[in-house]
Amino acid sequence: MKLYEQVAEEISLLIDRGVYPIGKRIPGTRELVKRFHVSVSTIMQAQRLLERRGLVEARPRSGYYVRSPDSHHAHIPAQSKPSNRPALVATKQMALEILRSSQRKGLIHLGAAVPDAQYLPYQALNRSIASVTKRHASEIPNYTFPPGNEELRQQIAMRMADAGCVVSPDEIIITNGCHEALTLALKAVTKPGDLVAIESPTYYGMLQAIESLNLKVLEIPTHPQSGISISALELAIEQWDIKACVVISNYSNPLGYQLSDQQKSDLVALLDRESIPFIEDDVYGDLGFMPQRPCAAKRFDQTDSVLYCSSFSKTIAPGFRVGWIVAGKWRDQVEHLKFSSSLASPTLPQMALAHYLDQGSYCRHIRMVRDIYAEQAHRIAEMVLQHFPEGTKVTRPTGGFVVWVQFPEGIDTLQIYHEALSLGISTAPGMLFSAVGKYNRCLRLNCALKWDERTTWAIVTLGDMAKKILSNN
């Protein structure tokens, strides 16, 4: 834990104990420097961290004041209320349109959940590519058949230990990104026409995978802070013949919540008791805003019934398309499905990532981007509340790099999407994140983009568009 994080933890503890009451000013920078015997910059970093966590708020020329929990939570969307009946996915065309638009040059990328190049370790990756190209030139043109590069699987196994999962390299199968891992998991445990339970809203790529396999979905109510409702899922299991459940356990896309350890344990136990495979998407697990990496739900798996999926697309290199799956009791079946569907994953990206991870700079890179994403998620949320129409609500994620915005009644974010795109701003309208096009007054914003005047202009412009729509209604 860094020094400023230690200071923030101590101040947080004093707030919890009521030493610094709600609404009161915490000691100023100079006083805190003397109290903790650290530098001014360390105190300033600690203050910004406390602000990102919603514990304090800055007041111009006055300092930092302890924030009321109600003032923080009042602007957060309520738990979702999706349909309680199975449905087919019907958002394919819009998803393709948005993905195509994200490739346009000069666009301000508030839509796609992809980190800006400046937040990726491309220089270190280039050095790793050069190194493996020089040392393994004869191996690079060859296939690396499933389960994948052995050195890479060893590195992944070591990092999964940070998530509380003790797995051997032989249990890991390399895939073409997390998307293929999720698709292979679904193929292994379902057949066309089966019903899959999902959180709602959920990542639209998952919905596309479900649609491609001719599966039906049942959307489960989900809260932006506490996550998927396990009690609602239990009721759904009693009513419907659910064949699999897919959940993003840490820093979900688009809501940004993190399931507690108890919730993860309860969820694993429920699904195991009902003999329902649990497909866990943990692609954002390394990007938490707190120093400690949260555990995966897989940690509580005692019967090999959790299929764990992840990738390096959100942390190191989206274009490398390197992900993996730990498929538990379906390991051999998934390996065969991987071979039959795509034969192998590209060799060079696997070797380069294995080399990069072995150099030991991954943890330092994660600490850097974690702080940046936390600050920018906080900044964008504050700008949304400042510039969007009164009554707008926005999530306060605890990790990842997206926020979910809910406008007042009368706003259609598909209209905002088209108008914004004409001005060079991409967004992700809420209807993408539901099988049946719900959440039409919501949108997801990417916080891992380059922060400059254009970004500020784009957010203000979106707010102005929404205000104009409301005034014309």
Image: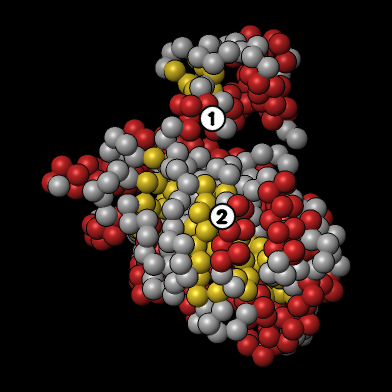
Query: By what rule are the colours in the image chosen?
Result: secondary structure
- The reply to whether callout 1 and callout 2 are in contact (CB within 8 Å) is no
Q: Earlier in the sequence, mark 1 or mark 2?
A: 1
Expressed as whole percent of the image width and height from the top left, the position of residue 345 reads 67, 80
Expressed as whole percent of the image width and height from the top left, the position of residue 315 reads 62, 57
What is the quadrant of residue 41 in the picture?
A: top right
Residue identified by numbered label 2: 232
Expressed as whole percent of the image width and height from the top left, the position of residue 287 reads 63, 49
Tag 2: residue type? Ala
Tag 1: residue type? Gly
Q: Residue at x 53, y 37 (%)?
A: 375
Expressed as whole percent of the image width and height from the top left, the position of residue 137 reads 75, 81
Secondary structure of residue under mark 1: loop
Up/down of 210 relative to 69, above or below: below
> Can residue 108 be seen by looking at this rendering?
no
Q: Residue at x 28, y 38 (%)?
A: 389
Residue identified by numbered label 1: 54
Up/down of 419 relative to 46, above or below: below
Q: In this view, does 397 lie to the left or right of 452?
A: right
Q: Is residue 359 left or right of residue 399?
A: right
Up/down of 104 relative to 264, above or below: below
